[in-house]
Structures are given as structure tokens and as C-alpha cells.
Amino acid sequence: MFQPSTFREDRVEVMHALISERPFATLVTMQEDGLCADHVPLVLHAEEGGPGRLRGHVAAKNPLSRCADPIDVLAVFQGPQRYISPAWYPSKQEHGKVVPTWNYAVVHARGRLRLQTDAAWLRAHLGALTDRSEAGRAKPWAVSDAPEDYVERQLRGLIGFEIEITALSGVWKVSQNKTDRDREGVLAGLGGEGTPEAAEMARLVASRARPPAGLGGPKAAG
């Protein structure tokens, strides 16, 4: 992934936060018939000072379950994203030298995937995934709410996997390379859209008026 210095994100805790908030990943693998992308929720198990591990599962019939593990994988976590109109820039009225762009935040996690066939491991993973997904609900559902024999049958149709993360890379492209006036125009334009997605992007733009110290200067194009 191309990482212009202005938009590059290297802080593990920031990337972990996006992974936890947006756990539905695109998992890219190289299989016998070429590149394959699976779309799966992954649970992050963070480690002190390290990139951590990701745990997930797929149907037992998924070709991924027949891979000769360990295999190298890439998990892509897409954060907020939004089209940015050049009509929002005050500089459009001044000189017209503006073009559309797309703001986004994304994390790439590279690692080594190993399959997990142990029923206890898979049950624990599904419990963790469910608990995180149900958190905050008035009456959260738990795996134990379902009949035990039903749960066991479901488990037999799944296979788990764990990814030891070897590298994390992030890009937060949220108008850091624009002037203060043009960024204000972006905030106004996003606010005028009146959608939760636009409001979420506006918060990112407002929070990153300038790149964090040591993460690059204002010269990268975007």
C-alpha cells in the first residue's frame, strides 16, 4: 500500500483502535487458482508493545480451510471513507486549480495464518466474537443461549484460524495536505451532507489538521 508521508500512520494503538471498531475485514490469500478474497469479522488480541494476533473462522467448505498452513495473508480493515468535492474548497473561487479526491482511513495487517481445528478453541473464539459484537445491547445474546446440541452441530461446520501479525501499516488521508481554509470548506461540505458517514469523516478531518509529529510534512500529493 502506498503511504505518502503526510497520511502515513505508524502508531500501533491507533491502528488497533480502527481494527477493533471496524472488525469486518477483507482477507486476501494466494490459493491454488490464484488470489482469493474472503470477507470475515476478525477479533484482535492485542499484545503489549506488539502488533498482536487476529482470530477468525470460515465455513469448513471454504477453500481456505484446505490451505497448506501456515500461509502468508493480508487483512484489510476499511475505516471511514468519503468523496470530497472540489466545489467545497474556497480556493476553487480563487484560481480553480482543484480536483476531486477521496478521503479514507485504512489498515493493512500482514501475517501468517494457521488453521485451528480444536473445538474448544473455536468455541472460545466464537464466544469472544459474539460478546464483542453484542456489547452495549440491552439484552445481549450469548452462545450459551442456544441449545448445546445445536451449537455443537454448528461448530462442526466451521474451521478457525489465527493470524500472527508480522506488520501493520496505516493510511489516514483526511485533508491534511490542504490549507486551513480549504479544510474548513471540507468540514462545511461534509456537514451539509447530513449523514452519519459524512459526520464521521468530518470528525477525522477536524482531528488531523496537521500530521502528527514525525509522520511527515505537507508536501505529499493526494
Image (cartoon, rainbow, N blue to C red):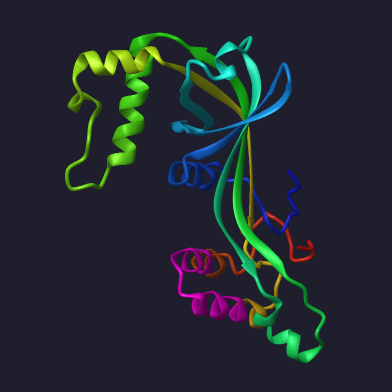
Q: Residue at x 65, y 68 (%)?
A: 175
Left or right: 109 in relation to 48: right
Number of numbered discs overlaid on the protein picture? 0
Q: Residue at x 51, y 33 (%)?
A: 49
Left or right: 87 in relation to 14: right
The image shows residue 33 at horizontal and vertical percentages of: 73, 20
* Residue lying at the far bottom of the rendered structure: 94
Check if residue 193 falls in the magenta segment. Answer: yes
The residue lying toward the viewer, choosing from 193 and 44, is: 193
Q: Quadrant of residue 100?
A: bottom right
Vertical comparison of 169 with 115: above or below:
below
The residue lying toward the viewer, choosing from 163 and 7, is: 163
Check if residue 177 falls in the magenta segment. Answer: no
Judged by its main secondary structure, the magenta piece is helix
The image shows residue 123 at horizontal and vertical percentages of: 33, 18
The residue lying toward the viewer, choosing from 103 and 8, is: 103
Q: Residue at x 25, y 47 (%)?
A: 136
From which residue to which does the magenta span run?
Answer: 184-202
The image shows residue 61 at horizontal and vertical percentages of: 51, 16
Q: Residue at x 30, y 26 (%)?
A: 127
Vertical comparison of 171 with 183: above or below:
above
Quadrant location of the N terminus in the rendered image: top right
Quadrant location of the C terminus in the rendered image: bottom right
The image shows residue 144 at horizontal and vertical percentages of: 20, 24
